[in-house]
Image (cartoon, grey):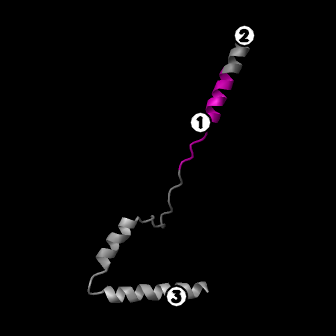
Amino acid sequence: MLQKVLTIVSIVVISVFCLTGCKKKPEPAESGAEAAKTTAEYEAEAKKEITKENMAAELEQIEKAVEEEISEGQ
């Protein structure tokens, strides 16, 4: 009788562990890694950096970077 009770309890405990599984903790980001920015963060940063006065220069810089990236891909 005691053996049956222990067997049933063991099965229940093992089943609970199997069904719930391990809850893996997320690995912390590397200290030097930059967190991913959201679109809103990029827009806020751009509004601070790009003004009417430097708009043409910023556009040229972006176009140059895009052209370099395209030429590297070919």
Magenta residues, start to end? 9-25
Instruction: Give the label, 3 or 1, closer to the camera.
Output: 3
**Residue at the spot 38% in from the left edge and 70% down from the top edge:** 42
The residue wearing badge 1 is 20
Question: Above or below — where is 41 with respect to 25?
Answer: below
Question: Above or below — where is 66 with respect to 22?
Answer: below
State which quadrant residue 59 falls in.
bottom left
Q: How would you rate the neighbour count of disc 1 (Cα within 10 Å): few for under 14, some for 14-19, many for 20 or more?
A: few
The residue wearing badge 2 is 1
Query: How far apart in space, not on screen, are marks 1 and 2 (Cα)?
Result: 29 Å
Instruction: Locate the C terminus and report the quarter of the image it occupies.
Output: bottom right
Under mark 2, the amino acid is Met
Q: Nearer the viewer, residue 26 or 65?
A: 65
**Image spot of residue 27 (x, y percent):** 54, 54
- Quick check: marks 2 and 3 in contact, CB under 8 Å? no
Left or right of 30? Residue 56 is left
Left or right of 30? Residue 73 is right
**Residue at the spot 61% in from the left edge and 39% down from the top edge:** 21
The residue wearing badge 3 is 68
| Mark found first going from the N terminus, 3 or 1 | 1
Question: Above or below — where is 26 with respect to 69?
Answer: above
Q: Nearer the viewer, residue 5 or 40?
A: 40
**Image spot of residue 4 (x, y percent):** 72, 15
Under mark 3, the amino acid is Glu
Q: How would you rate the neighbour count of disc 2 (Cα within 10 Å): few for under 14, some for 14-19, many for 20 or more?
A: few
Element under disc 3: helix
